Amino acid sequence: MAQNPPDIRPDRAQARLERDLSTVRPGAQPTIGMVSLGCPKALVDSERILTRLRAEGYGISGDYTGADAVIVNTCGFLDSAKAESLEAIGEALAANGRVIVTGCLGAEPEYITGAHPKVLAVTGPHQYEQVLDAVHAAVPPDPDPFVDLLPASGVKLTPRHYSYLKISEGCNHKCKFCVIPDMRGRLASRPHKAVMREAEKLVENGVRELLVISQDTSAYGTDWRDREAKFPILDLARDLGQLGAWVRMHYVYPYPHVRDLVPLMAEGGVLPYLDIPFQHAHPDTLRRMARPAAAERTLDEIAAWRAACPDIVLRSTFIVGYPGETEAEFQTLLDWLDEAQLDRVGCFQYENVEGARSNALPNHVADEVKAERWARFMEKAQAISERKLAAKVGTRIDVLVDSVDEEGAICRTKADAPEIDGNLFIDRNLGGISAGDILTVDVEEASEYDLWGVPAGSESSHAT
Ligand code: SF4
């Protein structure tokens, strides 16, 4: 079966985790290793678990062999992600032998223990206390007031200058291809004050970019019974926008009230970037997916957003080869993309996921047809991206520097979320540039997904 290419999978956070764990040095206290699979939301869970462990005096190890036990935070979104989780558990067992499993796949403990009976414990998503209990049982803590000091911003697995900010858990929708509501439960939004406190602390500790995540960001707060505002996400976005950091909104469902978010982007409080999962464009496919608001006229919405904020960058994800997708439905999606001219696009070939209602739908699409549609879709998306980036050559834009070494600096523009979008590379005139800086850059070159430039005002800057 054709695989979804790794670079568009949302469930690949391990490379980043390995890189960032190397900065948390184990001391003499017991050490715990962590393998984090899955989406940014799972990465936030891993950060919370490690923050608690660090606060209790545990050291954090970047490899299996140096650890007294290993936590594997699993992903169960697609069957291929489940297989990858089982593989990671097997690897950790072989290398370390003392393994605690948590995360989405932990909602199916027999599936894990059937394949790996030697795991020490299995806990489900967000069961932080149970994970800690399992760690305490496997490796009792050895508290030491001189080494237990928790960094003020917690243990962060993302570079210090950006951080994910989880504002709610769960989802009240029932999209047929998705088992997340079964695994993560109904929408439960964190209080506005708690989110703001965390965000303020992060910014005080040097975070320059906050990446707002949840399963359904635009629904934030709609689960509060006695709420004052109809759509609390608007107040939260406005308040986050006052903190002086870049604020990037992910997983915003295209409800009509998103129109009220866009003016905040035009004013500059929130980045003009919407990560909005459309999944498809044909009304029949969307109905078979049971997507809420399937009948919304998304092209009209996009036009309204662009009218209110001409610089807005739209990122979305799509599923091709959904059960029953006809060539005509797929063609509608291609035509829609032609009109929508989205800036950033990810695309999955449909896969059955155990427990998903879409498995039982008739007329599953053959693997080779899915692969062929995926290639056609990506070809179009790439051409749009290439054209849009070419138009940036010769302009001057702000970038956030993610890393610098002797070969150059890897940066992101306001249009690029970390890990999933492109980069702007600077390969000369690097003097004085550090990770976390925000610079103005003259754009000199573009490819399909990335840009190259030099700091504005430097000698070889050719911007007009
Ligand atoms: S909106 Fe749909 S796809 Fe997204 S988490 Fe909820 S049920 Fe799953």
Image (cartoon, helix red, strand yellow):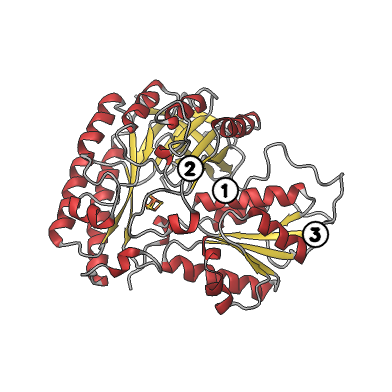
445 and 363: which one is in front?
363
Query: Label 2 is placed on what type of residue?
Result: Ile
- Indicate the secondary structure of the residue bearing disc 2: strand
* Residue kind at label 1, given as amino acid type: Val
The percent position of residue 281, horizontal first and vertical second, equals 22, 49
Q: Residue at x 55, y 34 (%)?
A: 191
Label ID, residue 30:
3
Q: Is disc 2 in contact with disc 1, using a CB cutoff of under 8 Å? A: yes
Q: At x 20% / y 35%, what residue is drawn?
A: 300
387 on left or right of 224: left
| Image mark for residue 274 | none
Tell me if residue 278 comes above or below residue 37 in the rendering: above
Q: Residue furthest front?
A: 226
Q: Which residue has dot 1 on it?
A: 44
Left or right: where does residue 455 sit relative to residue 286?
right
Along the line of sight, the residue nearer the viewer: 439 or 268: 268
